[in-house]
C-alpha cells in the first residue's frame, strides 16, 4: 500500500474521531447559569438608613404637623456669632497710659464665639464715690467720680442733666463739672458702652 492510501485512511480516521467527540460533547452539554444583578429595592429599609416616615410609639404613622407637635422649641439664650475681622484688646504694661497704648489679638477673624464672650469685653461700670458730694445749685462744681470699668467716651449726668468738662482719667476715675440744678439730692449716673449705672442721692445741691 503506497503513502497516498495511508494518508487517506488517516484523514478518514481523524474525521471520525472528531465527529465522535463532538457528539459526546453535545449529549452531555448543560446550560451554564449566569448570575444577573437583582433590581434595587424600591421599598425603604431602616437597615440602610433610609426613612420615609415617622411613627409614634403606638405604631401610628405621623404627618409632618403631628411630628412637629411632638417637639418643643429650646430658647437660645446665648447666640453664637462669627467675628468678621480680627478684634484686639488693649494692653498696658505700666498701668499709667489711658487709653491703652498697646493691643493684642483677642478674637481672630472667623472665630465663632457665644455673644456672652463679646459682651464680657464691656463690663458694667460701677460708682464707688462722688467727691465732693455737695455743691452749689448754680453748678460748675468740679467733681471726681471713682468706680470701675470707665471707658473713653463715658458720659455723666446729675439728676438727668449732663455734666460738662467730662474727662475719663482711667478706668477708675472721672472728673467733671456739675450742671445747675435746684437744691436737693440727685442721682449721679455714668453711661458707658455696657449701659448706665447710677448712684441714688450721689450729689446734693445746696
Image (cartoon, rainbow, N blue to C red):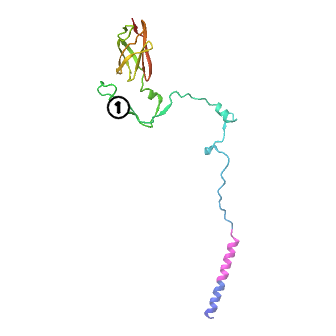
* Image position of 7 (left or right of 154): right
Q: Name the residue under label 1.
A: 103
From the viewer's side, name the closer residue of 84 and 63. Answer: 84
Q: Is residue 35 above or below residue 198?
A: below
Q: Position of residue 45 (x, y in %)?
A: 64, 45
Q: What stretch is highlighted in magenta?
A: 14-29
Q: Which residue is depicted at the point 64% across and 83% down?
A: 14
User: Looking at the rendering, in which quadrant would you find the C terminus?
Assistant: top left
- Above or below, 86 against 176 in this view is below
Q: In this view, does 195 lie to the left or right of 176?
A: right
**Frontmost residue, 36 versus 158:** 158
Q: Which quarter shows the N terminus? A: bottom right
On screen, residue 27 versus residue 199, left or right, reads: right
Please name the predominant secondary structure of the magenta segment in the image.
helix
Residue at point 40%, 15% (across, down):
163
The percent position of residue 107, horizontal first and vertical second, equals 41, 34
Q: Quadrant of residue 55?
A: top right
Q: Position of residue 129 (x, y in %)?
A: 37, 13
Q: How crowded is mark 1: few (under 14 residues within 10 Å), some or many (20 or more)?
A: few
- Residue 8 seen from this side: yes
Asked if residue 202 is positioned above or below residue 69 in the image, the reply reads above
Describe residue 148's horizontal placement relative to residue 76 as left or right: left
Is 25 part of what is drawn in magenta? yes
In the displayed image of the protein, which residue is found farthest to the bottom?
2
Magenta-span inclusion, residue 120: no
| Residue shown at 38% from the left, 16% from the top | 164
Q: In which quarter of the image is residue 181?
A: top left
Amino acid at each position: 500500500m503506497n503513502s497516498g492510501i495511508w494518508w487517506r485512511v488517516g484523514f478518514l480516521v481523524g474525521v471520525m474521531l472528531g465527529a465522535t467527540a463532538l457528539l459526546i460533547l453535545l449529549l452531555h452539554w448543560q446550560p451554564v447559569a449566569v448570575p444577573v444583578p437583582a433590581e434595587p429595592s424600591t421599598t425603604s429599609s431602616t437597615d440602610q438608613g433610609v426613612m420615609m416616615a415617622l411613627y409614634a410609639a403606638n405604631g401610628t404613622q405621623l404627618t409632618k404637623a403631628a411630628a412637629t407637635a411632638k417637639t418643643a422649641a429650646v430658647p437660645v439664650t446665648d447666640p453664637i456669632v462669627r467675628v468678621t475681622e480680627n478684634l484686639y484688646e488693649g494692653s498696658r504694661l505700666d498701668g499709667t497710659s489711658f487709653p491703652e497704648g498697646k493691643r493684642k489679638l483677642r478674637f481672630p477673624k472667623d472665630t465663632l464665639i457665644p455673644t456672652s464672650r463679646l459682651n464680657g469685653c464691656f463690663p458694667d461700670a460701677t460708682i464707688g464715690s462722688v467727691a465732693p458730694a455737695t455743691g452749689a445749685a448754680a453748678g460748675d462744681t468740679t467733681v471726681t467720680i471713682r468706680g470701675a470699668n470707665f471707658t473713653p467716651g463715658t458720659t455723666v449726668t446729675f439728676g438727668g442733666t449732663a455734666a460738662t468738662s467730662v474727662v475719663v482719667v482711667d478706668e477708675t476715675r472721672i472728673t467733671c463739672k456739675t450742671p445747675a440744678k435746684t437744691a436737693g439730692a440727685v442721682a449721679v449716673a455714668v453711661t458707658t458702652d455696657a449701659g448706665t449705672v447710677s448712684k441714688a442721692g450721689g450729689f446734693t445741691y445746696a
